[in-house]
Amino acid sequence: MIEVRNAALAYGACVFLRGVSFALAPGEVLALVGPNGVGKTTLLRAMAGLHAPAEGEVVLDGRALQAIAPRARAREVALVSADGPAVEGVTVRELVSAGRLPYRPWWRWSPDPEDAGAVDEALSRTELSHHAERPFHALSSGERQRVWIALALAQRARTLLLDEPTSHLDMRHAFEALRLVRAFAAQGHAAVVVLHDLNLAAAFADRIALLGAGRLLRCGTPEEALDEVLLRTAYGVRIDVQRRPDGRVVAFANPDG
């Protein structure tokens, strides 16, 4: 599993996030939350091996992620970006099939039965089977987002990284997307999800990593991470946190704060 060890993230000489440390556990969903520009997406890219930390390291099963070949990394870690490109000229099935490329030798472009099975399963789990032969560019923005999630599921990696997977989704499909993430983790895998909605994070994540003020403020259970003082530090506004009768916490901005 992935472990982030005292990582600092930078662009050029500008370090914008320091002191990030946490380890993923099998079966876990971890939510990354924090204000815009704090570094959530860059941290996710670092966990995919696409952005080298300025300090510290990201390791996969004890091995530095940057030292692992890209094809081998792609069999272990799948990344779903917030806004995938509006690809033209391909069907939904063809695009989801791209998730199988890390498993194919360079001379074989056509899918084998295992590839086809993985693609069919991913389409079914994301409720896209009936769209399989439609052009990708003809889908709605929410449907496109589900296609990118299906591509990652077809990749069959052990760790799934998702950058705002609920963007462009209505409430039902947002819940369904996060239920897919929970089902993925329940198979002994791990998932990291960037979310803006604190209540979705509290409802679906086992742990929340709260980023703010240029650092990791806290990584813990929703009850531990959604602390009113830390939330004000992160967001600069008053956010009230209440505990529901079932023990879960809910957070909402206080307009008087």
Image: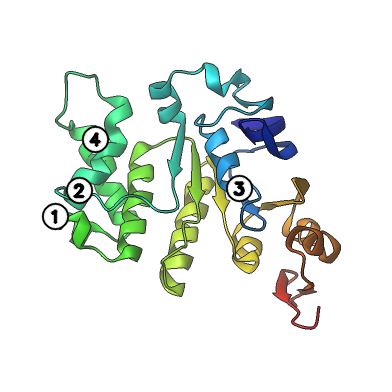
Mark closer to the chain start, 3 or 1: 3
- Circle nearer the viewer, 3 or 1: 3
* Tag 4–tag 1 contact (CB < 8 Å): no
Q: Amino acid at mark 3?
A: Lys
Question: How far, Cα to Cα, is label 4 from label 1?
Answer: 17 Å
- For mark 4, give the secondary structure: helix
* Quarter of the image where one finds residue 22: top right
Q: Considering only vertical position in the picture, is 200 above or below 146?
A: below
Disc number placed over residue 254 in the picture, else none: none
- Circle nearer the viewer, 2 or 3: 3
Q: Is residue 18 left or right of residue 175?
A: right
- Circle nearer the viewer, 4 or 3: 3
**At 59% from the left edge and 62% from the top edge, which residue is drawn?**
196
* Tag 2–tag 4 contact (CB < 8 Å): no
Question: How far, Cα to Cα, is label 4 from label 3?
Answer: 32 Å
Disc number placed over residue 93 in the picture, else none: 2
- Circle nearer the viewer, 2 or 4: 2
Residue that label 4 marks? 115
Q: Amino acid at mark 4?
A: Asp
- Circle nearer the viewer, 4 or 1: 1
Horizontal and vertical percent position of residue 103: 30, 26
